[in-house]
Structures are given as C-alpha cells and as structure tokens.
Amino acid sequence: MFAEAEAAHYERLQLNDAGELKHLLTLDGLSGELISQVLDTAESFIEVGSRSIKKVPLLRGKTVATLFFEPSTRTRTTFELAAKRLSADVLNINISSSATSKGESLSDMLRNLEAMAIDMFVVRHASSGAAHFIAREVTPEVAIVNAGDGQHAHPTQALLDMLTIRQYKPDFPSLSVAIIGDILHSRVARSEIAALKALGVKDIRVVGPDTLLPMAVESFGVRRCNRMSEGLDGADVIITLRLQKERMSGSLLPSEHEFYSLYGLTTDKLETAKDDAIIMHPGPINRGVEIESAVADSSRSVILEQVTNGIAVRMAVLSMVMSGQINARRVASGE
C-alpha cells in the first residue's frame, strides 16, 4: 500500500495534466507506455552522434545547469554532451567551490540560480530524496532531472539500460533478467527493477549474499538468489553492479577476493546462462571484483553500447521534460 501511495505521489509531481514528463525523479509509478516513448525518442537521437554537425535545435535558447553534489565523470559528461547536442546552454556548477560549501543553504542556492533564468537542473546528490526536495522547492517553471540520489533512484541509467536491452532482446515479457551484486546500496538496481516491471518482465532475479540484499526484497517483485548458478540459470540478460563501498557501513563483506570468488561474473559461471545472454554493467567497472576482464571484453558484453545509448537517452529525457514543462505552462496560463 505504501509503495502504491509513493508511486502515485511521484506521478503527480513528475507529470503534467496531459501525462507528459515535466520532471524525471524516479521510474516508480511511470507506465510502460511512457518509458517506451522515452526509448523511442532516444532511438531517433542515436544517429545525431554520427553526423558531421552533432546538433539539433530542440533546446536552443534554454539553459541547463548541472548540480553534482557527488563526484561523477560518465553521468555528468553524458548529460552535458546531451544538452549541448540539443543546442542548450550548459552551466556546470562546481559544488566544491560554491556558496553551499561556505554555509549557504540549498534553498538559497536554488533561488539565486533561478534568478539567472535557469530552465532545468540536472541533480546528483548523496541524500535519497534530494531531487524530490528540489523539485518541490523550485518554481514551477524549472524542470528537475535526477542524475542519482543516494540509494533511491538513478532513472536515466535504467532507461539507457532498457534501450540497450531492447536493441538485443526486444520481447521484454519473455526475458529472464539477473541483477548481481550490491542490491542493498544500489540506486541503479531499484530503478532497473521499476523499469523492467513496467515493461512487462516477469522473471527478475537479484543475486548476492544476504548482507547485500534488502530485507524482504521479494516485495519488489523479484526472486532472491544467493547462488550464482541459480541466478544465472537460463538468464537472457545479466546486469552486474559496482560494489558501493562508499555507501557501506560495517563489515558487509569478508573481502573483495571472496566476493569475486562467489559472485564475480566469470566465464565459468556464465555456463548456466543462455548462450546468447548479454552482459551489462553501469560502470565504472572494478575488474577482478565484480566481473572478469575476459567477460567484460567479450562479444556478449554490451557495456560500451550502454555508454553510447546514455547520450541518446539523456537527450530524449531533457527534450521531453522541457516539452512537458512548456505545455504545463501553456495550460496554466490558459493558452
């Protein structure tokens, strides 16, 4: 009941009256149809990267600010590149030297940025719910895109993974998907599960030691597997996760070596999966901890395709959220 109420709350906050995105905070509560629309839009942007002039004018005259309170290279870079390919002006806020590091509140920082006529904030924060808080704090004219908040959500990572899966395995309801590793601390895992369920996947396995799996994880609509042989048996898609060492408290793992021995994705362990199973990882990869180099670099790996798709998916999200905001303003003004 609580999960349904939470999803309904996010739906009201994220969607305008026409059911279009005006923020992207989480995939919880979004329909499979809307997620598919994002993926369709992203497909149309993939070819932009192969043009001699890699730009389209959809966000010309708009300003996108990236607010990364957590370090990131891949996510921040792909969001910046996506915004620039849409012809937006991009403002990267250096949080370590910003006024918030000198005592200014987040609310005051947002007010000052709004005064500069920023149209959209792309936010990454170590606290779960931070993007939700910011979406409630800013004026209705400003769009918020969540680039990862605490252990809560990383919606664009899940969307780019869904696009990658669809390119190889388009029949989602028939798939068996295994997610391996640190599910407990992973915002990616939560968003992956929400997206897979919305797209009709019925067989989702989470694989890892009990110390890295949430209590009552079955309530997410997934199957708990403590052995790799069980989790990978007949799998079509295998998603390995990075160990979230910076979010762990206490001794949840005896050692990285033991984790790799039991849960590292190796050529031998892959024998129980389907022969044409694809291998994914959200990055950055810890070789010899979560995955064997021979597997990460194999023909079954689609990790580099995930990176390429990340730009197209983030272009789709930025353009759709901005369009939803504009349409919401038109309705509010009676146009």
Image (cartoon, helix red, strand yellow):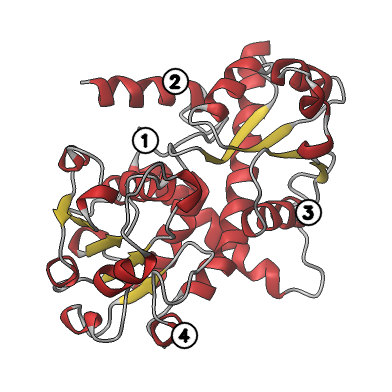
- The amino acid sitting under disc 4 is Asp
- Kindly state the secondary structure of the residue where label 1 is placed: loop
Q: Nearer the viewer, residue 34 or 225?
A: 225
Which comes sooner in the sequence, label 2 or label 1?
A: 2
Q: Which residue is mark 4?
A: 297
Image side of residue 5 versus residue 163, left or right: left
Q: Nearer the viewer, mark 2 or mark 1?
A: 1
Q: Residue at x 20, y 38 (%)?
A: 215
Q: CA distance from mark 4 to mark 3?
A: 30 Å
> In the rendered image, which residue does mark 2 sit on?
12
Q: Pointer 2: residues within 10 angstroms few (<14), some, or many (20+)?
A: few
Which amino acid does the dot numbered 3 rest on? Lys
Bin the neighbour count of mark 1 within 10 Å (Cα to Cα): few under 14, some 14-19, many 20 and up: many
Could you give the CA–CA distance between mark 3 and mark 1, rounded to whole angstroms? 28 Å
Please say whether residue 245 is visible from this viewpoint.
yes
The residue labelled by disc 3 is 84
Q: Give the quadrant of residue 174.
A: bottom left
Q: Mark 1: which amino acid?
A: Asp
Query: Which one is closest to the eye, mark 4 or mark 3?
Result: 4
Relative height, residue 292 to residue 7 (above, below): below
- Of mark 2 and mark 3, the one earlier in the sequence is 2
Drawn side of residue 248 relative to residue 261, left or right: right
Residue on which disc 1 sits: 28
Alpha carbon of mark 4 to alpha carbon of mark 1: how far?
32 Å
Q: Nearer the viewer, residue 169 or 128?
A: 128
Which image quadrant: the C terminus? top right
Task: Give the mark nearest the N terminus, 4 or 3.
Answer: 3
Q: Nearer the viewer, residue 123 or 99?
A: 99
State the residue in front, 215 or 277: 215
- Residue 147: where, in percent of width, then height? 58, 43
Query: How far is the residue under mark 2 from the one under mark 1?
Result: 12 Å
